[in-house]
Amino acid sequence: MSNKLNTGEAYDFKTQYGQNVSNIILRIEWISNENNLYAPIDISCVLLNGWGHCVETINYENLSNNNKSVEHKGDDLDQDSDIDYEDIKINFKDIDLYTEGFVFTVFANPGVNENGEVDNEDETILLDNCIAKLINTDNGNEICKYEMKEIDISDGTILMCAILKTEQGWSFKALGYGIESYISDDVKDEIEEMKLGRLRSKGLFNSYIETFKGIEPKYKLIQVAIWLLFVAGIIFSAFFFVRMLNSLR
């Protein structure tokens, strides 16, 4: 049975039914209020590093990252359905080592007509409800979900939920946090203000050591070579400085 979360709650989904979860779909469904003329809703996924800094956004304009470990599956084109939805798929096996979080947003994408004018600028866009579902694509099971009701999304963005790396694995967190802007930079600023990165509490040195342990051997050799060159540069600079002082005496 799927776990239903309230705002602020988190659920660790590292394993489900005794098996590791490696591929998931984050599906966001919504039902438009009957008074809406239309609801041009879109979802996006903002990728975070371990410090909670935004590094990339996957949305309708950028449907995947370079290795396609995170993919936006596009708009829901089924106009006959009562429930609209969009999916974002994540393959945890292939994501970049430095990617440690994903924040999923819901916003009313302003429609632009042929004259370059915003069609729905002054329109009130209401949703009767909005549901984020975490689905294990390896077996089709719904892992957990989070629902918000009666949302006014006319001029803003809902930071709906997040998937965050923890010491135990991966965790789904229900955010339900609204901001009065759909501008990408504003959204990123708000996300970074939430300080979701797990490495913030570890300090710079411990964070680096932990990251170093997780990288592939060939990259470890590159890191070691860089540090050796750095140390050699310091020693050479110190030696040159001492010789210069002696020559001035």
Image (tube, helix red, strand yellow):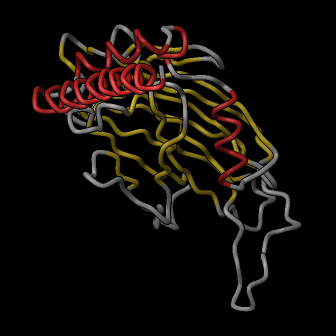
The residue lying at 78 percent from left, 76 percent from top is 119
Measuring from the top left, give residue 227's x and y in whole percent: 27, 25
Asked if residue 104 lies left or right of residue 114, the reply is left
Image height of 16 relative to 145, above or below: above
Image height of 216 relative to 27, above or below: above
The residue lying at 48 percent from left, 16 percent from top is 198
In this view of the protein, which residue sits in the foreground, 125 or 214? 214
Q: Quadrant of residue 247?
A: top left
Q: Residue furthest front?
A: 249
Asked if residue 85 lies left or right of residue 107, the reply is left
Measuring from the top left, give residue 213's x and y in whole percent: 23, 16
Q: Quadrant of residue 211?
A: top left
Q: Residue furthest left?
A: 218
Image height of 26 relative to 123, above or below: above
Measuring from the top left, give residue 62's x and y in whole percent: 44, 62
The residue lying at 50 percent from left, 45 percent from top is 45
Q: Quadrant of the N terminus?
A: top left
In this view of the protein, which residue sits in the foreground, 203 or 79? 203
Image height of 225 relative to 154, above or below: above
Asked if residue 161 lies left or right of residue 202, the reply is right
